[in-house]
Amino acid sequence: MANSYTPVTGEEPLKRLLPDSADFQDFISSNAVLVDKTDLIRDLLNSSPIRTFFLSRPRRFGKTLLLDTIQNIAQGDRKPFSSFHIGKEGSGYVWEPYPVIRMSFSRFESNPKIFRGKLLSTLDDIAMSHNLDIPPARTVSDIDAIISALSKKHSPAVLPNTLPGIEPVSANVVLLIDEYDFPLLNCLDNPGKAEKIRSMLRVFYSTIKDCRKKLRFTFITGITKLSGLSMFSGMNSVVDISMDPHYSSICGFTDEEISSNFHCHILAALPQLSGNNTLPQNSTDQTFMDELKFWYDGYSWDGKIKIYNPFSIINCLWKQKFDHYWYNSGTSIASFKFRCNTKIYNDLFINNLRARSLDPIGDLTGLNTESFLFQAGYATIDRIEIKFRIMDYILKCPNNEIAYALAKDFGQSESPFPGIKGAISEQYTAFIEAFEASDADECARLFSSLLGKAALALHNPNEYTYQFLLFTLLNVRGYSARLEQYVGEGRADILYSSPASRFQIVIEIKRAAAVSTDDAPAFHESPSPGSVLPGFPELSEPVRQSLEDGIAEAASQVLARNYVRPFYLEGETRVCAVAVHGWGHSMFRFFKVDWKSRTIQMPVPKETP
């Protein structure tokens, strides 16, 4: 069971993990693990005269917990922070209580009428929680009445340099707004609704700008910065810290933070993960860290500091299981962009997507795909190249969890491949059935069909391209295909298992030979079961031999690196060797493994799993 680890003498007690809480007081009252980010929060709060900040981070990345921590600091109670940076003597922060307005758009509807009603009722709730004697909100600009009333209520009777007869005004209100763009992202495909909501938010934020002399500190979070929607047109003093290197780790975890905060939990999980062969026997805490890095690390907003997804880390340690926690926790928004640009997806998958700019997104009808995928968490900065004073961002897929998310979203979105209408998953579910039945000929027929259709859209025939196409196909039903998985003495290209399968399948792919995309066969409709692939001549002897050589190379690598060894106790394991010749031909072979002789047996016949 999770959290059952008993520490040895001298180790700290195992603190609780709270995978679903974003409430600072929950962590304090239950003695749960809370990574200390208050040194960075202190720097923000002390940044006078800069008072308004914006932070973009993907969903489930700790933005709400960050705001809740800021709220507790702003309310002035130092006691819960005695063990945190900001609460220690000499921290540089002056503790004083301030009134806090806290808002979140995370549960607002994308229907404009319902959105307006919810916003007005939220303003009324804020006024009531602060015991303000003001009329009910009638327009979204009534946020001004709340800010003014709070500022007056908590201002001293006399302020320095206040003229007689003039009401005292002090910048003492803290305003925190979470997930400002949530209603807009929910109507990406309905520009009419988005425009109506944008108009209301434009008035709302312009009103906040007019209240700047009463606001000590304002912090706004979201997934994207939609500058073209005039969200911040009246707030040109907003400082976007999303890509500021100093604040790169303000959300998420660094290597050092995981090692220092979760070491006991890593030790507690090792027996479980080694016992079920998720990790090799006798794995160390460093083995676990390497696997955590492979699954959940790799996010970067400056190309240097790498950050782990905090939601996935906490869930992995809590459940003592590697899984797709981030993807499974909410609705994806990436598939919206996969309708039209397969090359971007392929380049991202092979860590070679270049972007000249990652500026704020202009508008909902002309979303910049690279910026959108970066801000949504599907792409991250691998490095920054500067040539002749021109900066290029080289983007990549952050980790294994996001690779799975990309494959799922791409396979289920409207296909951009010539000759494939609808989603890939609609036409290639038969591939899964053939794959689980070890039907090598049918797998080759269907996979070659997809290769031919993808040729003109992908432009880049190499092992990574073949790998991403096969990975996408194996995930069309939502089963567990794992990319570049650590097994034995290396990383297998793909590991596959499903509820219908009796065995694990270890997949290794080799490129037999390349041809120009000009030579790729043209497909307009998927071939019917059992039919001959249109446009393909009979295999010439050189092509057949190159495919056979590729199969032998793939199978030999599986044996040489002991990819199947971790699955010895799980029953039957099979090997799938795949060879691809350009865009024209593929070959599949399924093998059984003989554990006594440690050899791969003859190809298995077609069967029903």
Image (cartoon, helix red, strand yellow):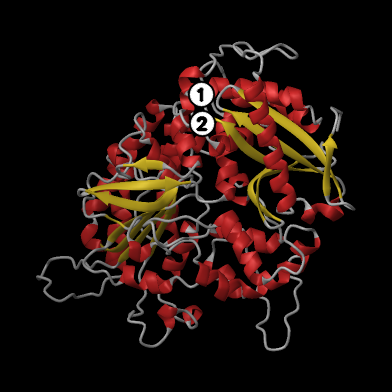
The residue shown at (73%, 30%) is 432
**x, y percentage for residue 74?**
38, 70
Where residue 338 appears, as percent x and y from the top left, is: 48, 31
Q: Secondary structure at mark 2?
A: loop
Q: Earlier in the sequence, mark 1 or mark 2?
A: 1
Is 22 situated left or right of 542 in this image? left
Identify whether 183 is placed above or below 68: above
| Quadrant showing the C terminus | top right
Q: Which quadrant, please, contains the N terminus?
A: bottom right
- The residue labelled by disc 1 is 455
- Is 243 located above or below residue 367 in the figure? below
Disc 1/disc 2 C-alpha distance (Å): 8 Å
Image quadrant where residue 422 sits: top right
Residue closest to the eye, 220 or 362? 362
Secondary structure of the residue carrying tag 1 is helix
Asked whether disc 1 touches disc 2, contact meaning CB atoms under 8 Å apart, the reply is yes
Label 2, residues with CA under 10 Å away: few <14, some 14-19, many ≥20: many
Q: x, y (%) of residue 510? A: 62, 38
Residue 330 appears at what percent x and percent y? 58, 44
550 left or right of 240 in image: right
User: Callout 2, which amino acid?
Assistant: Pro
Q: What type is the residue that disc 1 sits on? A: Ala
Residue placed under numbered mark 2 in the picture: 461
**Can you tell which of label 1 and label 2 is closer to the viewer?**
2
Report the side of 188 relative to 478 (left or right).
left
| Nearest the eye: 164 or 543 | 543
- Tag 1: Cα neighbours inside 10 Å, few (<14), some, or many (≥20)? many
| Total numbered circles | 2
